Amino acid sequence: MPLATVLIAQTSPTLTVSPLPTVKARKGSVAAVTVRASLPPGFHANSNKPTDDYLIPLTLKWTGGPLEAESVEYPKGTMEKYPFSPKPLSVVTGEFSIATKFKVPANAASGATAQNGTLRYQACNDRMCFAPKSVPVSITLEIQ
Amino acid sequence: MTSFRSNLRLAAIGGVAAIVGLVACSPAPPVKTAVKQDAARKRAPEFALKDANGKVVHLADYRGKVVLLDFWATWCGPCTVEIPWFTEFQRKYKDRGFEVLGVSMDEDGWKAITPFVTQKKVNYRIVLGDDKTGDQYGGLEALPTTFVIDRDGRIAAVHVGLAGKKDFEDAIETLLQAPARPSGVNASGDRSNRAD
């Protein structure tokens, strides 16, 4: 018998990723894409460089599409103190951006296509933590 | 409510281009749950989970003892605050019929758990949780979630999120002072079977 009735629901916060405009990518060039995301007030996620090895970092992985990610630049975490940690933690809160530079192959097929990735994060508030989640991210590309 | 690993699967197949819905929610205050009255206690769901040595552990193995059942993970900061308390409780109350049982919800399993419990000098048994057990215990959306179970295998208190050390100790003391019921008799006086 599930014990939902004895628990007070604590809903996991959902990361919102803003819609991305179509990216026009010229063959043989570098295309820059910025993914903008936000967490609800009162919640934080670990930055890409958490202060403890046990913590799960924010990561954006590009897993499918014609482009090759050259670099992913994460937001610098802010050092925040929480009741559960004796030392400040490197976290992201509110709105933040992740910038990716893609190499567009010279032999890429022209036309419309998509580049897909996954944004993984693990959120907490000041008293509890929530399961790591992965959010799909997709870019519409116009390769010229 | 879905379990941790189910949540991950759902997120992965959700697949809506770049947008996911925003669930408006805000941090909740700490949840303080007093020990429930005898008649209001529900039976803690049975489980069979493996410890670090591969031994299958059933909750029923602890019948007759007061059990602090802690769902936690190595990546959960608030959990790491409570773990030293639980280690102290294990030492302090063990001889009076009390046990702490930690259920780790780490996706990486023992690879993540073993170095952590060694570093933290955890002195109580840890088992690796699974989706089924998480669902049975209400979905476990947030960690830590801790159940204090009486000698008859019934849930006497629940804490979701970082709780107070004294809240736990008060519950443990209260339950240790209460005698166990005659074997196999539930709160209604009925003969009961193990809830497998």
Image (cartoon, helix red, strand yellow):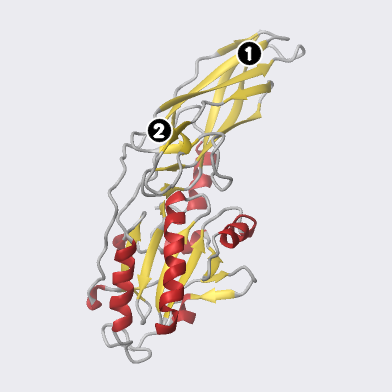
Rendering coords of residue B163 (x, y %): 33, 58
Name the residue tied to disc 1. A31
Residue beneath the point at 38% across and 38% down: A43
* Three-letter code, disc 2: Leu
Which chain hosts label 1?
A: A
Q: Is residue B172 visible?
A: yes
* Callout 2: chain: A
Dot 1 falls on a residue whose secondary structure is: strand
Disc 1 to disc 2, C-alpha distance: 26 Å
Q: Position of residue B89 (x, y in %)?
A: 41, 71
Q: Quadrant of the C terminus of chain A?
A: top right
User: From the viewer's perspective, is residue A127 above or below residue A3?
Assistant: above
Instruction: For residue B45, say whether it is visible.
Output: no
Same chain letter for marks 1 and 2: yes
Q: Which quadrant of the structure image shows residue A48?
A: top right
- Counting the numbered discs, the total is 2
Number of other residues with Cα within 10 Å of mark 2, as a class: few under 14, some 14 to 19, many 20 or more: many
Q: Residue A39, which numbered label?
A: 2
Picture quadrant of residue A60 = top right
Q: Is residue B51 left or right of residue B195?
A: right
Q: Nearer the viewer, residue A96 or B25?
A: A96
Crowding at mark 1 (Cα within 10 Å: few <14, some 14-19, many 20+): some
- Vertically, is B32 above or below A77? below
Question: Which of A101 and A19 lies nearest the eye of the viewer?
Answer: A101
Which residue occupies 60% across, 14% down?
Answer: A32
